[in-house]
Amino acid sequence: MATTAAQSRARDGIGLPGVVLGIGLGGFVDGILLHQILQWHHLLTSTDTDNIGVRYYPPDTVHGLEINTLWDGIFHAFTWLAVLVGLALLYSRVTVRARTWASRALWGWVLVGWGVFNLVEGIVDHHILGIHHVRAGEHQTLYDLGFLALGVLLVVAGWLLQRSAPVVDERRAR
């Protein structure tokens, strides 16, 4: 089925809100699941082998855990702000609320944002800066590469999902 330029603009109008929401939600999953529930890493737990010279704060000392918890909190604040900005952007573009919230286009863009989060966080923090890894120790490179692969998969799946979404004609829905 051919897509007109107007249909394409309508679907892409929620692209930025979806990506920003996905970045925030991806950060929540990383912070809540990997940092807190599984305790595989904190933001600075691999700074003993980092590439930028950040002081090491071992997570098994009170002081080290305090510093890591502080930086985890700063990280969570960033992801929370991303979710708020994404919601504000989405709200500013929503004219047919029920259709937009239920659309494959929105959730496809959310998946793209989540994948972008994984790719940026994985490349910058795990590989370039080396300040932490998904799971430090044996097989850490495999865990880090798996995190990147999940990011690529989310970007591709989200892109395909948003491309398959039917176009909402806002003029007819009013």
Image (cartoon, rainbow, N blue to C red):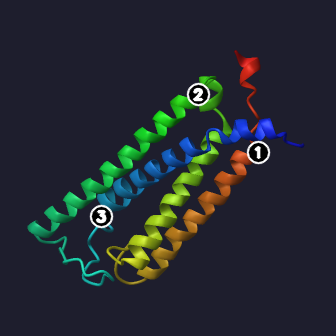
> Residue beneath label 1, please?
164
Q: Position of residue 123 (x, y in %)?
A: 47, 72
Residue 134 seen in this snapshot: no
Q: Which amino acid does label 3 sit on?
A: Gln
Pointer 2 local density, CA inside 10 Å: few below 14, some 14–19, many at least 20: some
Residue 75 as seen in the image, left or right of residue 21: left
Residue at 51% across, 66% down: 119
> Residue beneath label 3, please?
39
Q: Which amino acid does label 1 sit on?
A: Ser
Res 173 → quadrant:
top right
Mark 3 → mark 1, Cα distance in angstroms: 37 Å
Res 68 → quadrant:
bottom left
Res 134 → quadrant:
bottom left
Q: Where is residue 11 in the image (x, y as percent from the top left)?
A: 70, 39
**Total number of numbered labels?**
3
> Residue beneath label 2, please?
94
Mark 1 → mark 2, Cα distance in angstroms: 20 Å
**Which numbered disc, 3 or 1, marks the residue that appears first in the sequence?**
3
Q: Where is residue 66 in the image (x, y as percent from the top left)?
A: 14, 62
**Which numbered disc, 2 or 3, marks the residue that appears first in the sequence?**
3
SS assignment at label 1: loop
Mark 1 or 2: in front is 2
Residue 40 seen in this snapshot: yes
Q: Position of residue 38 (x, y in %)?
A: 33, 62
